[in-house]
């Protein structure tokens, strides 16, 4: 059995012939730089993949960006030369790449699949490449589970694209970011909870210096005290119960979340958790609480719909097209407004912010190319973003900007993402230990008893 790669494939050994990987369209749409992730092994792109990419090249979304980026890269690589029989070099210390015309299934498999569709052409071409290179390892690489099953049925070696897959252990650790401390010294509890500084030296809590923004629950006879490691001060500080625009935490994780969202020193926050745990509500309420400190509050979410159609197929202008996608954000806004009387200054302030676009709900596709200065930016359902999309968004951050990403990595709507490869998981894994970043996993559903039971049992 050929090894699947949790990281980039290693370079081949001396005397070993390079492997050949046949790439499916979804690999390029997922990561347009994927051709540079296979070390000195060779790549084959079936021509039907180029035809499919042509359908995706228009638009502002990530698929269009990746399609265009790949085609520009291939054009640069092949400038002034053709692919020839063996392909062209991709770059230094990399293998060769070749565009291969489509080939039919061999006679022994001619009746296996009846429909003439791109997936079957890619598979038949991969089989042809394998049969014409008997002395080399050949594998089809695709993120399409159905195509992987078909390839296995046809006896073709097939692999997922795993170079951006976060290890299982790290995914599990992201849900265990709180360290529990039982029966601490009485003076530690007293200094942390009741002293004017409400902080203690980290040596009273841990044998080794914690990572920045490490969260703690210190349990004693009186209950649990929430705390966080402040790396700049070198102390473990008390996390106090705070409210944000009428929203108060209902559990310890929500207390951590509100503290992070209200802390101006923490510029990047990641919140994960199941339905009804309060992720979006806390992010939005915290933004409203600090509205005077930011020039604008932007709320957005990926426009993922059934059938992978884009918002362009919906009738109406931009605002009308976005309304089905932003309704969950508006629902959270209405929950916050319900904390106040309709004529209260808080409720009227929200209405005024919406009218003046101080509070703006915007399509995510329009973020690319912008510079977001002094903005409180909230991205909901971020588990449906690729790692590259997350990077694109964060690199838009200017001076004074704070970004909050929320989502549930177990409820992914993108067909080629999973809990290991989505952008929200990558964000938590790559930014872990940075002073300006904090991750909170919300465990308890607070929407309703019915919602909580359904989330656990169904």
Image (cartoon, rainbow, N blue to C red):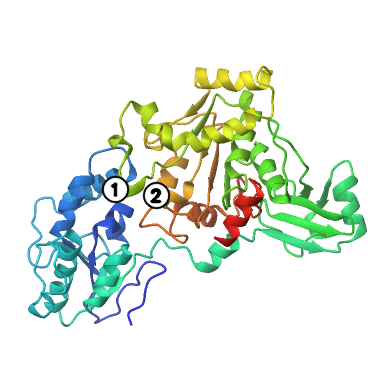
**Image quadrant assignment for residue 1:** bottom left
Q: Residue at x 33, y 45 (%)?
A: 62
Question: In the displayed structure, would residue 346 be above or below residue 220?
Answer: above
* Label 1–label 2 contact, CB within 8 A: yes
Work out how far the residue at label 1 is from the one at label 2, CA to CA, in angstroms.
10 Å
Q: Between 72 and 279, which is closer to the camera in this rendering?
A: 279
SS class, disc 1: helix
Q: Examine the image and state in which quarter residue 332 appears.
A: top right
What's the mark number on residue 348? none
Q: In which quarter of the image is the C terminus?
A: bottom right
Drawn side of residue 165 relative to residue 158, left or right: right
Residue drawn at x 76%, y 51% is 227
Q: In this view, does 418 lie to the left or right of 151?
A: right
Residue 268's place in the image compared with 97, above or below, is above
Which residue: 13% across, 67% down?
114
- Can you give x and y, in whole percent of width and height, for residue 197 in the image? 85, 42
Using the rendered image of the protein, determine whether residue 57 is visible from the camera's viewpoint: yes
Q: Position of residue 190 (x, y in %)?
A: 91, 51
Q: Can residue 440 be seen in this view?
A: no
Residue annotated with mark 1: 66
Give the residue displayed 90% in from the left and 45% down from the top. Answer: 194
In the picture of the structure, the residue carrying the numbered disc 2 is 388
**Residue 121 left/right relative to 405:** left
Instruction: Classify mark 2: helix, strand or loop.
Output: helix
**Above/below status of 367 relative to 77:** above
Residue 346, image x and y in percent? Answer: 66, 22
Please name whichever residue, 363 or 93, is drawn nearer the observer in this view of the structure: 363
- Label 1: few (<14), some (14–19) or many (≥20) C-alpha neighbours in 10 Å: many
């Amino acid at each position: 059995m050929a090894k699947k790669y949790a990281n980039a494939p290693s370079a081949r050994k001396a005397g070993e012939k390079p492997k050949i990987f046949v790439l499916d369209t979804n690999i390029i749409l997922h990561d347009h730089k994927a051709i540079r992730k296979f070390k000195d092994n060779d790549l084959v792109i079936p021509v039907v993949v180029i035809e499919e990419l042509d359908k995706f090249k228009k638009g502002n979304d990530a698929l269009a960006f990746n399609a265009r980026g790949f085609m520009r890269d291939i054009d640069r690589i092949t400038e002034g030369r053709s692919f020839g029989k063996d392909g062209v070099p991709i770059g230094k210390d990399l293998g060769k790449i070749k565009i291969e015309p489509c080939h039919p299934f061999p006679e022994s498999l001619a009746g296996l699949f009846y429909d003439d569709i791109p997936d079957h052409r890619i598979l038949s071409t991969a089989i042809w490449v394998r049969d014409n290179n008997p002395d080399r390892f050949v594998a089809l690489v695709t993120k399409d589970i159905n195509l992987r099953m078909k390839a296995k049925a046809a006896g073709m070696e097939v692999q997922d694209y795993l170079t951006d897959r976060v290890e299982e252990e790290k995914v599990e650790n992201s849900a265990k970011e709180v360290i529990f401390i039982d029966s601490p010294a009485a003076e530690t509890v007293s200094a942390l909870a009741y002293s004017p500084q409400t902080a203690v030296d980290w040596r009273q809590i841990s044998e080794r210096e914690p990572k920045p923004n490490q969260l703690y629950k210190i349990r004693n006879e009186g209950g649990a005290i929430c705390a966080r490691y402040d790396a700049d001060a070198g102390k473990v500080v008390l996390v106090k119960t705070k409210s944000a625009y009428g929203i108060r935490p209902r559990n310890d994780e929500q207390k951590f979340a509100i503290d992070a969202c209200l802390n101006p020193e923490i510029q990047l926050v990641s919140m994960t958790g199941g339905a009804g745990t309060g992720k979006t509500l806390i992010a939005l309420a915290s933004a409203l609480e600090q509205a005077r400190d930011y020039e604008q509050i932007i709320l957005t979410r990926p426009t993922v719909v059934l059938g992978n159609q884009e918002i362009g197929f919906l009738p109406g202008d931009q605002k009308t097209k976005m309304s089905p996608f932003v309704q969950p954000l508006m629902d959270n806004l209405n929950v916050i407004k319900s904390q106040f009387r309709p004529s209260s200054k808080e409720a009227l302030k929200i209405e005024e912010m919406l009218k003046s676009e101080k509070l703006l709900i915007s399509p995510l596709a329009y973020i690319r190319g912008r510079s977001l200065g002094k903005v409180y930016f909230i991205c909901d359902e971020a588990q449906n973003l690729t790692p590259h999309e997350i990077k694109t968004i964060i690199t838009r951050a200017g001076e004074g900007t704070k970004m909050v990403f929320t989502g549930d990595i177990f409820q992914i709507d993108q067909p080629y993402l999973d809990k290991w490869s989505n952008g929200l998981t990558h964000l938590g894994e790559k930014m872990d230990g940075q002073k300006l970043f904090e991750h909170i996993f919300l465990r308890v559903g607070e929407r309703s008893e019915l919602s909580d039971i359904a989330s656990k049992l169904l």
